[in-house]
Amino acid sequence: MSLDSRKASNLSRKDSTARIDDGRRRLLKAAGLGGALAAVAGGTLLSAPTSAMQTRARIVIVGAGAAGIAAANRLARGLDGAAITIIDRRQRHLYQPGLTLVATGIWKPGKVVDRNDRYLPQSVNWIQDHVAEFDPEANRVVTTAGRVVPYDYLLVTTGLKIDFDAIEGMSPELIGRESIGCVYDNPEHAERTWQMIDQYTAAGGVGLFTRGPGGIKCAGAPLKVTMLTEDIARQRSTRRSLEMVYNSPGAGLFSQPDTNEFLKQEFPERDIAINWHHRLKGIEPEAHRATFATPEGDVRIDYDFIHVVPPMRAPDALGNSPLAWQEGGFADDGNWMEVDQFSMRHQRYGNVFGAGDCVGTPIGKTAASVKAQVPVAVDNMINTIRDRETVARYDGYTSCPLITGRGRGILVEFDYALNMVPSFPFISPYREHWVPWVMKDRMLQPAYNAMLRGRI
Ligand SMILES: Cc1cc2nc3c(=O)[nH]c(=O)nc-3n(C[C@H](O)[C@H](O)[C@H](O)COP(=O)(O)OP(=O)(O)OC[C@H]3O[C@@H](n4cnc5c(N)ncnc54)[C@H](O)[C@@H]3O)c2cc1C
């Protein structure tokens, strides 16, 4: 981005706050919820809609998060007579995209907590347990209580595991203590992260911001936490007392090249230093010291606040099962489920499909990707039951309202080719705007709930 456009961006940042109320009204009037829905819809190719198909097929969905519930609603509507079972012991539903706003004091934690039973169709049988074993050779799963559940067709939507153990000295219980924060995990930890950020932006000192290597869900979240913390300190007039350092495990900040360039200019302009090739390896909570693995060897840095983002991987039951990549692909990186990245069908087990954070696709661990993947997986499963060709295709669509400060952000939408695929032609994905903020703060949660109900 040229200097001129950076200046324009800074100007528009100031103007945007003044224009936001008037503009928000115009946006809501012009686009309605439809605009927000379009932004999470993405590009997918589906087969022509038909009436509900009669079948006695036994379908098992493992995981009742964003993808599992959305799929249950679509399958219940698309099939007449199927025995659909969903397995998950978790009863509360978490609107995870809201955790960033909880961790930065903008939302209260209650706003992101809901109940799964409000979204699951009555015709779906819910087994409140976790799957301990996937046995695709025998077409069955076994729960932790030892219940054997056979299936004709399986959809895996287990989400992912946040691997706290991969960081020496770290455990989730430390979040909210000893100046440690982590936006991932759950609303209680996000709220405690806000207490840590609140203290840090008042007291100042060295703040370390980290990001786990490899595929993580919402890769924008660690960046958003960094920029919002910086913004909060500026609003409080304490910014000069903060020495902020973002530690990237690799040579970039974001996978989409234009957004990466934007951030590589934005961070230094905001006096956020960047350590490249710094992977968080361990912490000493009481000493407030972090160890990073770097190409030159281990580096220890003392901190007054640290935002810990562990590596992420498939949940153990899935990652250790035959459904995970066995060789090549993601076998050495995350143990993700092996699917064809376009059809969402397992590459070795034709009656098994996957969607959401658990699958090994090159990009796409976001709710926006779930929105695009689930209709594809469901459509292709139904056509498999019909004994027809699977034609639905997922193009890699993913999206992130990359919040750069309160009231502004950039709306990043891209596909497998890492090309920008903007849903709103009037919002440049290359400069800050108030619309992504309004989407994040007001519009995406209703759109997400509509997705859960299988309506979009
Ligand atoms: C801080 C943060 C910010 C984010 N911001 C955004 C954003 O701005 N935009 C966006 O689009 N996305 C965002 N996301 C990502 C988005 O929330 C996830 O990609 C999405 O929720 C993934 O849905 P899922 O169904 O795959 O997994 P989840 O919703 O996590 O659900 C997985 C379910 O599987 C269950 N499960 C796990 N193992 C088993 C087992 N063995 N047996 C049975 N059930 C099991 C779990 O209990 C859980 O209920 C954000 C996420 C976080 C954490």
Image (spheres, rainbow, N blue to C red):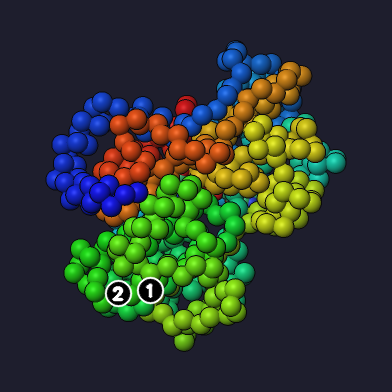
- Can I make out residue 207 in this image? yes
Give the amino acid type for the residue marked by disc 2 in the picture.
Answer: Leu
Residue furthest right as drawn = 138
> Which residue in the protein does label 1 denote?
207
Q: Residue at x 51, y 82 (%)?
A: 300
The secondary structure type at the circle numbered 2 is strand
Q: Are marks 1 and 2 in contact (CB under 8 Å)?
A: yes
Which is nearer the eye, 337 or 243?
243
Q: Position of residue 112 (x, y in %)?
A: 40, 49
Q: Residue at x 70, y 23 (%)?
A: 390
- Can I make out residue 145 in this image? no
**Quadrant hosting residue 347:** top right
The secondary structure type at the circle numbered 1 is strand
- Mark 1 and ligand 1: say if the CB distance to the nearest ligand atom is below 8 Å: no
> Which residue in the protein does label 2 denote?
242
Q: Is residue 326 left or right of residue 415?
A: right
Mark sitting on residue 382: none
Residue furthest bottom as drawn = 287
Q: Position of residue 272 (x, y in %)?
A: 35, 67
Q: Position of residue 270 (x, y in %)?
A: 29, 63
How far separated are the C-alphas under marks 1 and 2?
7 Å
Please determine whether, in this image, residue 131 is positioned above or below residue 425: below
Residue furthest top as drawn = 51
Q: Position of residue 340 (x, y in %)?
A: 70, 37
Give the amino acid type for the residue marked by disc 1 in the picture.
Answer: Gly
**Quadrant hosting residue 180:** bottom left
Q: Is residue 175 left or right of residue 353?
A: left
Q: Residue at x 57, y 74 (%)?
A: 294
